[in-house]
Image: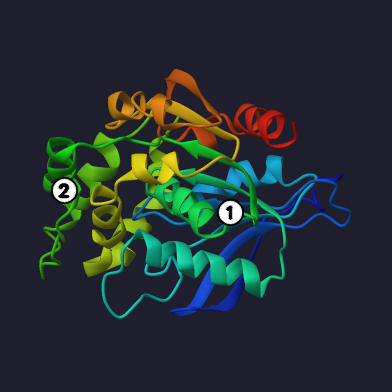
């Protein structure tokens, strides 16, 4: 397939909460199951842009902007993880997809797992990049770090605080240019910035995982939830944990072909 054919395109569809913005690759003759990828919040589907070019060579691959993030319209009030999953189930129905694989990243992992719980016969395989098992103290710690709105100030003094969240959590593959590319997602989210993270921090992922019999691969890369993701193994009925401590945030941009090879090997088995 030529590079021209495998370009990442963008599209709007009508979602549960207004317009939903998609990043996608759509080959002329797909030979593998479609894949839908859920991003970390408050980012957007653009975080999958490089990865989509590789994994989308042989399948429809979609990275929607979660409602309220990126260029997708927002709910009129905060919703929980089941609400975000319902919005994604609506998208899959709208696209008339009858069988799909899922990928989640951080907050997106909670959405992917809950969607598989809601629609077990629709989902075949699940790839999760970070799947933290949070106890009460873990949850509270993350809420303290990321669960508050950084209110805009007339002099722009809120912007360094937003930048600190982007810069301090960077991985070894993330360049300053890439951080600047994703920084507008943090600004655009505005007062909705903590909505999806809070929904994830308050969600009991282990109880969802216990209900899933799907094949699951969890990639554990270095992040604030590296240690808590390492705890997910006992809750995987049909899964495995891949330890990648040399990776960090940005591995989808810094190592897209390697990430796609891991994903393809798992999803197409």
* Residue neighbourhood size for the residue with mark 2, other residues' Cα within 10 Å, grouped as few (<14), some (14–19), many (≥20): some
Q: Is residue 64 above or below residue 218?
A: below
Q: Is residue 219 above or below residue 98?
A: above
Closest to the observer, 98 or 108: 98
Earlier-in-chain disc, 1 versus 2: 1
Q: Which residue is mark 2?
A: 143
Which residue is located at x 14 percent, y 40 percent? Answer: 136
Closer to viewer: mark 1 or mark 2: 1
The residue nearer to you, when weighing 139 against 67, is 139
Q: Tell me the colour scheme of the image.
A: rainbow
Q: Is residue 244 left or right of residue 80?
A: right
Q: Quadrant of the N terminus?
A: top right
- Which residue does the image show at 33% across and 34% down from the upper left? 170
Residue 264 spot, x, y in % from top left: 70, 34
Which residue in the protein does label 1 denote? 120
Residue 161 vs 90, above or below: the answer is above
State the CA–CA distance, disc 1 to disc 2: 30 Å
| Local secondary structure at mark 1 | loop
Check if mark 1's residue and mark 2's residue have beta carbons within 8 Å.
Answer: no
Mark 1 residue crowding within 10 angstroms, few (<14) / some (14–19) / many (20+):
some
Please say whether residue 172 is visible from this viewpoint: no
Give the quadrant of residue 235: top left
* Residue 245 screen position, x and y as percent: 41, 18
Q: Residue at x 45, y 57 (%)?
A: 44
Q: Quadrant of residue 164?
A: top left
Q: Is residue 174 visible?
A: yes
Q: Position of residue 260 (x, y in %)?
A: 65, 34
Quarter of the figure that contains the C terminus: top right
Give the SS element for disc 2: helix
């Amino acid at each position: 397939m030529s590079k021209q054919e495998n370009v990442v395109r963008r599209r709007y569809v009508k979602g549960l909460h207004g317009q939903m913005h998609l990043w996608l690759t759509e080959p002329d003759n797909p030979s593998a199951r479609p894949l839908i990828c859920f991003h970390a919040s408050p980012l957007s589907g653009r975080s999958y842009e490089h990865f989509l070019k590789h994994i989308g060579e042989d399948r429809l691959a979609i990275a929607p902007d979660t409602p309220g993030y990126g260029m997708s319209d927002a709910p009129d009030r905060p919703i929980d993880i089941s609400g975000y999953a319902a919005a994604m189930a609506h998208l899959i129905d709208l696209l008339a997809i009858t069988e799909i694989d899922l990928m989640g990243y951080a907050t997106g992992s909670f959405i992917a797992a809950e969607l598989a719980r809601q629609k077990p016969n629709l989902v075949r395989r699940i790839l999760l990049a970070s799947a933290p098992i949070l106890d009460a103290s873990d949850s509270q710690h993350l809420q303290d770090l990321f669960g508050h709105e950084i209110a805009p100030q007339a002099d722009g003094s809120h912007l360094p605080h937003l930048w600190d969240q982007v810069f301090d959590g960077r991985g070894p593959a993330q360049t300053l240019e890439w951080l600047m590319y994703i920084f507008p997602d943090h600004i655009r989210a505005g007062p909705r910035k903590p909505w999806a993270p809070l929904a994830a921090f308050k969600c009991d992922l282990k109880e969802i995982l216990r209900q899933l019999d799907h094949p699951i691969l969890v990639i554990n890369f270095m992040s604030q939830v590296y240690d808590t993701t390492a705890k997910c193994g006992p809750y995987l009925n049909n899964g495995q944990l891949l330890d990648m401590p040399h990776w960090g945030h940005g591995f989808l941009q810094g190592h897209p072909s390697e990430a796609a090879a891991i994903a393809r090997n798992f999803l197409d088995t």
